[in-house]
């Protein structure tokens, strides 16, 4: 049975069907030395297919092992393999593959975060992205502006955009304060910036956008930003059955690997190491940069401290340790003269009053306390009186007849 060339190459992990079609149109694909064109089909997989002069190992449907990754995309990363400006891409953090490559299921713009799926099966990626399959995508949206019921009804009924009619399958309000409101919306298409354009048509601006679900695959809290996790065979088969593909019987994950999943701390540690490695590579170098920083810090310490490397004197003390015996008029650590914290003098009656206890019988001009003529203590009343004498108002126990 013959298959289209782009379908076979997509199954071999060379990209999505659209990407391969562009390669064919650009004349980058050849079959047995002849430049391929759109519409070519392969009868036999033993032919020699090359992309940019490199031989491609064709994979049949029986030999392919479908793998799917769930990736929590942070804001600022691009959904492209190579960026001419050198910015971060979503493919930088993914694990390396010996055969084939990862194909992204859909795209998210640089300002959008959340769930992004990757697979080694190009056919699976193409069917999940196709509008005819109507696979639901759920987003958490925070909009800035006043939202009315009429706006929500318009978004559910449909709005005319530049590329045709578009609408939300469901809109759920999740709260908000002031002019900021949060909604959960569901769409079944993957147009470019569709969610943002729908809200813009109603006169409100999207300030934050995050994808939280693709089909029945949810973005859980155990997957931190910048981390990835490979889906199990059950979840992979769900995606394949959704787009009418045969179920898989094999998986790369072992039984022990499925039981011992990586925790949140391990994923965050791996993400942190990746970011440190990128920052080191963009600098002067891993070893050279550290040595320079150590040398500069040691030189600065030598200029400030001199030859004495005592850490106590490095803080700025002269002679004795300034933390225990301050020099000069530092009364915060050890006051000069009388200790005002323990033995107050003068008119300081807040810590130790002079004469009688001013807290019970205030005298003099202390206007914060009650004058002595009206009584120092106030007679308790209400619940306070009951707390002082809880048995005072207790009813008598009735007598029982013998």
Image: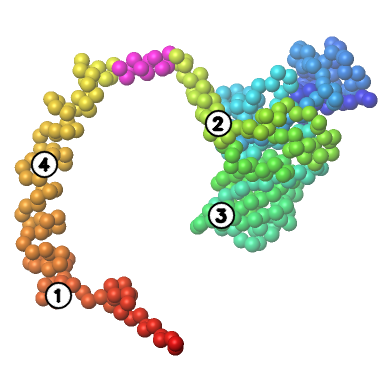
Q: Which residue is mark 3?
A: 181
Query: Regarding mark 4 in the picture, which secondary structure is present there?
Result: loop
Main SS category, magenta section? helix
Q: CA distance from mark 4 to mark 3?
A: 56 Å
Q: Nearer the viewer, mark 1 or mark 4?
A: 1
Look at the image and tell me whether residue 343 can be seen.
yes
Tags 4 and 2 touching, CB below 8 Å: no
As rendered, which of 99 and 15 lies closer to the eye? 99
**Mark 2 vs 3, N-terminal side:** 3
In whole angstroms, how far apart are the C-alphas of marks 1 and 4? 38 Å
Question: Quadrant of the image for the C terminus?
Answer: bottom left
Residue 290, by quadrant, is top left
- Of 186 and 357, nearer the camera is 357
Which class describes the residues within 10 Å of circle 1: few (<14), some (14-19), or many (20+)? few
Residue 271 position in % (x across, y down) = 55, 29
Query: Could you say where residue 272 lies in the image, as x and y percent from the top left?
Result: 51, 29
């Amino acid at each position: 049975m013959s298959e289209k060339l782009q379908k076979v190459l997509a199954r071999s992990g060379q990209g999505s069907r659209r990407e391969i079609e562009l390669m064919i149109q650009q004349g980058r694909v050849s079959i047995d030395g002849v430049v391929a064109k759109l519409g070519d089909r392969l009868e036999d997989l033993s032919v020699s297919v090359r992309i940019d002069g490199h031989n491609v190992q064709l994979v049949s449907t029986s030999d392919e092992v479908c793998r799917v990754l769930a990736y929590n995309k942070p804001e600022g990363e691009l959904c492209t393999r190579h960026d001419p400006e050198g910015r971060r891409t979503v493919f930088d953090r993914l694990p390396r593959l010996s055969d084939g490559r990862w194909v992204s299921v859909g795209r998210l713009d640089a300002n959008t975060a959340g769930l992004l799926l990757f697979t080694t099966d190009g056919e699976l990626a193409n069917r999940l992205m196709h509008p005819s399959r109507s696979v639901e995508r759920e987003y958490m949206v925070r909009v800035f502006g006043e939202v009315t019921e009429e706006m929500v009804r318009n978004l559910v009924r449909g709005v005319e955009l530049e590329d045709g009619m578009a609408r939300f399958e469901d809109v759920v309000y999740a709260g908000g304060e002031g002019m900021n409101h949060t909604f959960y919306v569901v769409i079944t298409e993957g147009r470019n910036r569709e969610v943002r354009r729908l809200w813009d048509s109603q006169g409100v601006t999207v300030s934050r956008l995050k994808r939280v679900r693709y089909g029945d695959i949810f973005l859980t809290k155990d997957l931190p930003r910048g981390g990835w996790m490979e889906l199990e065979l059950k979840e992979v088969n769900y995606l394949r059955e959704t787009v009418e593909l045969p179920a898989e019987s094999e998986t790369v994950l072992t039984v022990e690997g499925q039981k011992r999943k990586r925790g949140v701390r391990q994923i965050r540690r791996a993400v942190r190491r990746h970011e440190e490695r990128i920052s080191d590579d963009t600098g002067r170098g891993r070893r050279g940069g550290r040595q320079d920083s150590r040398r500069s810090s040691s030189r600065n310490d030598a200029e400030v401290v001199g030859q004495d490397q005592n850490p106590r004197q490095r803080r700025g003390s002269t002679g004795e340790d300034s933390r225990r015996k301050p020099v000069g008029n530092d009364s915060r650590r050890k006051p000069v003269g009388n200790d005002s914290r323990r033995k107050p003098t003068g008119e300081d009656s807040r810590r130790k009053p002079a004469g009688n206890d001013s807290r019970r019988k205030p005298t003099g001009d202390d206007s914060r306390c009650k004058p002595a003529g009206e009584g120092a203590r106030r007679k308790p009343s209400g619940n306070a009186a009951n707390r002082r004498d809880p048995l005072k108002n207790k009813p008598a126990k009735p007598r029982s007849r013998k």
